[in-house]
Amino acid sequence: MTASKEQFEIEKTDKEWQEILTPEQYRVLRKHGTERAGTSPLDKVYDQGTYECAGCGQPLFTSDTKYNSGTGWPSFYAPIEGAIATTVDRSLFMVRTEVHCSRCGGHLGHVFGDGPRPTGQRYCMNGVSLNFVPAKSE
């Protein structure tokens, strides 16, 4: 089962998604693509803030859980509770755990069991699937 076949709070037609996303965002979020490693400026952003789904704006990860995994993709050790869902991805002749937005089903990346403490998880996300919202200074 893939994320595109589930029911989500936000549902749009392909045409509606194409109208609000860039071609690269559409390819990754809606067609389960992957951006090239090292191409996302978000990989090196370590400011305080929140990473939201580029498709629907749902907060997904906080900067407190971001770390440099050395993979070339923004990586986190834990999502915001309830923000993501997972499915089994059997593409590329392997079995991986796909991560998608729990609100719109947009493909975000994959999760692996080689991350840091405290979770041991590495949520390896496509930067194009995310928008960074800096924390408001007081």
Image (cartoon, helix red, strand yellow):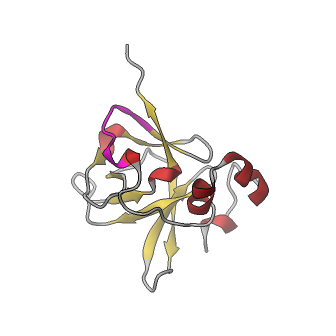
- Residue 34: x and y in percent read 49, 65
Considering only vertical position in the picture, is 22 above or below 14? above
Q: How many marks?
A: 0
| Residue 13 visible in this rendered orientation of the protein | no
Q: Which residues are magenta?
A: 43-50
- Residue 26: x and y in percent read 63, 57
Considering only vertical position in the picture, is 14 above or below 43? below
- Residue 111: x and y in percent read 39, 63
Foreground residue, 131 or 89? 131
Residue at 52% x, 52% y: name it: 129
Specify whether 137 is left or right of 30: left
Q: Is residue 25 magenta?
A: no
| Residue that sits furthest to the bottom in the current view | 93
The quadrant of the rendering that contains the N terminus is: bottom right
Specify whether 121 is left or right of 104: left
Considering only vertical position in the picture, is 130 above or below 106? above
Foreground residue, 1 or 22? 22
Foreground residue, 33 or 66? 33
| Residue 49 visible in this rendered orientation of the protein | yes
Residue at 37% x, 62% y: name it: 37
Residue at 71% x, 54% y: name it: 18
Specify whether 134 is left or right of 18: left
- Residue 70: x and y in percent read 25, 58
Considering only vertical position in the picture, is 76 above or below 3? above
Specify whether 132 is left or right of 21: left
